[in-house]
Image (cartoon, rainbow, N blue to C red):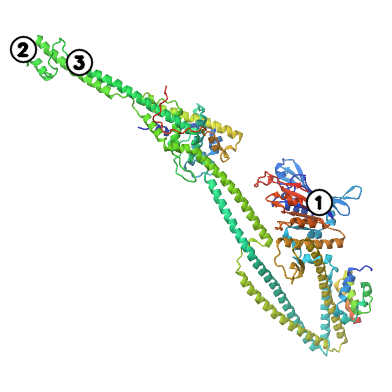
């Protein structure tokens, strides 16, 4: 059977109807990175072929398609395959979905099949078409998701199935069971007969019970031995794991340390980058003043101008005032002359009291002359008194005017001085600080840009180291916990193993003794000469059946060995073709105590390779798979494609292209989905150019939002 | 060579067992296909053939047992 | 006697109510009563007045004013006098910025047509001068709010981009070199005040 084409519509990350792959008869590889859609492709094929999965499910529908739909819109999910299987056929598995008010309503899953009868296409039942052409058994040996599924013999059922399907002789199990049953029955019949024979009954009974008891003991010992063997195998495995996990663990610890280191650096960077919030800094660091300088200058000029103007006005005012004051003084001086021109006594002589007395007494107390009312002298005195009073008054007025003048200010408040003082404050170092702000901002922005670049670098480094870690884990087939474990276990395990070996050896000795005893007892039993001829007959019947039973067991064993040997031979043929030139070794299929088989690799000098490298393991398993596939094609006269999803690149030594080119020449259809040939999202075209097979690239379409699944879709690109 | 069925192969594989051959006193020449073995004079060969045929025919285990047991009792 | 700066500091500038929901609540925790700074999550700024300050500077730098709506019911204030702006203690990654007020005041003096001579002579009352300064402040901010509002209509996410505000202000950095050569000014000839 050859797959010619696969189409995927609206299945998870494969949005819309334009997603198809065309395959050749040989190898097709599909290159994609984690998250690009590799596993989804694989799961789409599995979904198509799984005829028991008949429920339509919302989770399968492309998120992107879902997010675009309006109420009433309808679309469908579909995976279809065109293939050659005794003629061209196609099959599609699909269901519709419609957007409603409350969500999505899903249609039933349908299988639609077509066969070509040479002239036209005929509609057939899709489900049975799949079950006929590509049944579950073949799927198990044809589709492998991830390397962990590759150890095909890990469970006894699959081995049994393989043997049954492909070995020379089938259905041994039923026969072994039947003849075993017959042996038991004949034994019972014989025993019964013996017990009724007079002569030997007693002896027979004793022997029989001893034999039965012994059988049980032997059975128990055998079971114990099997347990011990199982345990020893586990110890060996564990010790092997531990030992070489130790080395892996050291590498792992180193990677962990580097990773931690890098992440710490990155976190510090991010903290620094976030430490300055641009918006807050506008106020807190006063970055908002980055354009303030011109305004500051305006302010300073204005403030200075006001200050100068004020001083100027004050000076003028003072001058005016001084003038006024001077005038007053002069006036005061000129005040003193008498009306009739005569020099008078100074105004302070006589004083007011004296004058009033004189006027009262009508006598001048200066010269003694009587001054009667109405006389000149009297008038003179009154006049003088009035003059005196006037003078005092005028003086008082002048004094008051002077006071007034002197008390007068032009400016009552000093707002301008405060403003000017503010202006001074904002100069000098404060002004320099403001001038600095644009530089400070620019510096910060440059710093953030530099740190941002550094962060990107670190992010890439972190991704690389994480990838390294993943590769290590996968190559070791171990989990993080296993590699994290402490290796003081080893000593303890060794001791336990030694003890188990000792115990097993003692059990084996025990067994041997008992088996010898058994043989003896049996011989004794055989030697019994019963009178009863019937007993003799039954004895012989039992003997034959016992031998027949053993013969079947042996035949079954031989059959299995032959099958494994054939398979091994075929696998080694492939191994030789697929291995790197410098590797010489062979695959051996070894049976284990649990009736299953392990695939092991041995070097050419016969020593086992306990921990093959990732690429060696891949080659080993693929060789076995190809060998099985050969058996299939021989038995069914029909070939099946091998579809293999390699979770990670096993080839660290760039032997990929050789490997793939060889596979391409093998006359087997092979579809491998891989991460090889990718370097951080970019294809290594020089290596791809050297490939002879078909190559597809799948990747997520750009501009997606990692937090929103509806923005993610896978794009398919045919490279060659 | 004529078509060899799975049952024929089974028969041959079992009968080639040395211990069985020894006890039953027969040789390679004495058996070939299942059909032939069913009419063999040798009771071991015949018994094995009957067992295999019984399972092929999908008879019940009890039926097969009865037949084989009786046959052996007669012929051993 | 209190200086003009102190008198100005006692005031509470007004802004138009229509900007409360579209701008102030969007960009700050104003309606959550954040003066205690207990809840500074999610919004860009803590107190509402911080948005006012930004709007003010936008108007100042563009040197454009927009008069306030004369209808008193369409205006409100923060109930938090200017003297309290930017003086909260540093916490939750914020620092106090008490000096910023001085610069705002200086800008208002520079740009408002105040007759300080008349003021010092006693011909006009200090409160009248402060009124002028406050009005100028409000009108600058009003222009700024308008500016912000238009930007938000175009792109509601505009100011949530990290350096959106910063870039607006960076446009105003003076370009000519040699602008700041002379630091002292005490001997400059004053411009005429006529």
The chain letter for the residue carrying disc 3 is: A
Front of the two marks 3 and 2:
3
Co-location on one chain, circles 3 and 2: yes
CA–CA distance between discs 3 and 2?
33 Å
Chain letter belonging to callout 1: A
The residue at 86%/79% (across/down) is B18
Circle 3 sits in a helix, a strand or a loop, which is it?
helix
Which sits earlier in the primary sequence, circle 2 or circle 1? 1
**Residue where numbered disc 3 is placed:** A334
Task: Tell me the distance, in whole angstroms, between the alpha carbons under discs 2 and 1.
Answer: 160 Å
At horizontal 73% and vertical 76% (from top left) the residue drawn is A223
Q: Are the residues flagged by discs 2 and 1 in contact, CB closer than 8 Å? A: no
Q: Position of residue A359 (x, y in %)?
A: 10, 15
- Residue B2 appears anywhere in the view: yes
Note whether residue A642 is visible. no
- Determine which quarter of the picture holds residue C119: top left
Q: Identify the residue under disc 2.
A: A370
Q: Which residue is mark 1?
A: A23
**Residue A414 vs residue A432: left or right?**
left
């Amino acid at each position: 059977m050859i797959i010619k084409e696969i189409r995927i519509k609206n299945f998870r990350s494969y949005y819309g109807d334009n997603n198809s792959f065309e395959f050749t008869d040989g190898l097709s590889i599909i290159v994609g990175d984690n998250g690009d859609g590799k596993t989804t492709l694989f799961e789409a094929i599995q979904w198509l072929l799984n005829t028991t999965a008949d429920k339509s499910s919302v989770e399968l529908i492309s998120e992107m398609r879902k997010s675009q739909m309006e109420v009433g819109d309808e679309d469908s999910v579909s995976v279809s395959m065109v293939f050659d299987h005794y003629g061209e056929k196609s099959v599609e598995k699909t269901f519709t979905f419609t957007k409603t008010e409350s969500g999505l309503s899903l249609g039933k899953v349908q299988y639609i099949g077509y066969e070509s009868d040479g002239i036209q296409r005929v509609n057939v039942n899709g489900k049975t078409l799949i079950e006929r052409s590509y049944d579950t058994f073949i799927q198990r040996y044809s589709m492998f998701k991830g390397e962990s599924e590759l150890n095909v013999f890990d469970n006894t059922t699959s081995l049994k199935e393989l043997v049954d399907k492909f070995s020379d002789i089938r259905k041994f199990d039923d026969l072994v069971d039947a003849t075993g049953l017959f042996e038991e029955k004949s034994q019972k019949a014989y025993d019964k007969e013996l017990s009724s024979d007079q002569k030997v009954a007693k002896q027979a009974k004793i022997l029989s019970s001893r034999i039965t008891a012994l059988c049980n003991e032997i059975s128990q010992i055998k079971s114990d031995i099997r347990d011990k063997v199982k345990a020893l195998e586990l110890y060996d495995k564990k010790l092997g794991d531990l030992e070489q996990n130790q080395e892996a663990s050291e590498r792992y610890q180193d990677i962990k340390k580097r990773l931690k280191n890098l992440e710490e650096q990155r976190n510090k960077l991010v903290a620094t980058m976030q430490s300055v919030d641009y918006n807050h800094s506008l106020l807190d660091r006063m970055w908002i003043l980055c354009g303030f300088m011109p305004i500051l200058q305006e302010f300073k000029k204005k403030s200075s101008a006001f200050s100068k103007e004020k001083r100027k006005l004050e000076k003028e005012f003072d001058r005016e005032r001084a003038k006024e004051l001077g005038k007053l003084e002069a006036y005061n001086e000129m005040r003193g002359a008498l009306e009739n021109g005569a020099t008078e006594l100074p105004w302070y002589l006589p004083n007011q009291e004296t004058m009033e007395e004189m006027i009262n007494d009508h006598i001048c107390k200066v010269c003694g002359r009587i001054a009667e009312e109405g006389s000149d002298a009297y008038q003179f005195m009154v006049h003088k008194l009035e003059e005196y009073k006037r003078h005092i008054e005028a003086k008082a007025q002048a004094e008051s005017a002077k006071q007034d003048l002197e008390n007068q200010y032009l400016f009552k408040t000093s707002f301008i001085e405060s403003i000017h003082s503010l202006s001074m404050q904002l100069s000098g170092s404060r002004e320099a600080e403001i001038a600095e702000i644009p530089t400070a901002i620019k510096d910060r922005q440059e710093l953030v840009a530099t740190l941002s670049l550094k962060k990107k670098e670190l992010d890439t480094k972190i991704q690389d180291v994480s990838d390294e870690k993943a590769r290590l884990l996968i190559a070791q087939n171990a989990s993080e916990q296993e590699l994290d474990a402490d290796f003081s276990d080893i000593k303890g395990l060794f001791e336990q193993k030694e003890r188990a070996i000792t115990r097993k050896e003692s059990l084996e000795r025990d067994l041997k003794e008992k088996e010898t005893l058994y043989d003896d007892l049996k011989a004794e039993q055989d030697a019994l000469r019963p009178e009863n001829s019937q007993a003799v007959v039954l004895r012989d019947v039992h003997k034959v059946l016992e031998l027949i039973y053993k013969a079947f067991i042996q035949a079954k064993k031989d059959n299995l060995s032959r099958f494994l040997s054939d398979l091994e031979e075929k696998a080694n043929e492939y191994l030789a073709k697929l291995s790197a030139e410098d590797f010489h070794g062979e695959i051996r299929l070894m049976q284990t105590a649990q009736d299953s088989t392990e695939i092991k690799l041995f070097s050419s000098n016969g020593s086992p390779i306990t921990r093959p490298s990732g690429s060696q393991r891949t080659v080993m398993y693929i060789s076995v798979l190809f060998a099985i596939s050969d058996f299939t094609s021989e038995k069914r006269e029909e070939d099946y494609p091998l579809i293999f999803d390699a979770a990670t690149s096993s080839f660290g030594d760039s032997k990929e292209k050789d490997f793939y080119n060889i596979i391409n020449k093998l006359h087997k259809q092979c579809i491998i989905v891989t991460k090889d040939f990718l370097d951080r999202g970019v294809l290594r075209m020089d290596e791809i150019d050297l490939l002879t097979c078909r190559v597809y690239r799948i990747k997520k379409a750009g501009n997606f939002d990692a937090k929103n699944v509806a923005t993610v879709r896978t794009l398919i690109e045919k490279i060659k | 060579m004529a078509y060899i069925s799975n049952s024929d192969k089974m028969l041959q594989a079992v009968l080639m067992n040395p211990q069985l051959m020894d006890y039953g006193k027969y040789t390679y020449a004495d058996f070939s296909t299942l059909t032939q073995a069913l009419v063999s004079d040798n009771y071991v060969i015949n018994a094995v053939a009957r067992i295999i045929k019984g399972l092929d025919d999908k008879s019940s285990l009890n039926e097969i047992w009865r037949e084989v047991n009786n046959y052996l009792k007669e012929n051993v | 006697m209190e200086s003009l700066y102190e008198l100005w500091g006692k005031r509470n500038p007004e802004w138009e109510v229509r900007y409360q929901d579209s701008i102030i609540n969007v960009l700050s925790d104003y309606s959550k009563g954040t003066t205690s700074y207990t809840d500074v999550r999610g919004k860009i700024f803590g107190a509402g007045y911080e948005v006012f300050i930004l709007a003010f500077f936008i108007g100042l730098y563009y040197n454009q004013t927009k008069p306030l709506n004369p209808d008193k019911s369409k205006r409100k204030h923060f109930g938090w006098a200017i003297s309290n702006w930017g003086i909260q203690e540093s916490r939750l990654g914020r620092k106090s910025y008490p000096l910023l007020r001085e610069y705002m005041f200086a800008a208002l003096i520079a740009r408002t047509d105040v007759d300080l001579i008349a003021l010092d002579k006693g011909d006009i009352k200090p409160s009248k001068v402060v009124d002028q300064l406050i009005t100028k402040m409000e009108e600058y901010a009003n222009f700024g709010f308008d500016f912000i509002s238009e930007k938000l209509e175009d792109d509601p996410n505009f100011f949530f981009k990290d350096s959106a505000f910063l870039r607006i202000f960076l446009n105003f950095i003076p370009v000519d070199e040699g602008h700041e050569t002379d630091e002292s000014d005490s001997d400059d000839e004053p411009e005429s005040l006529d």
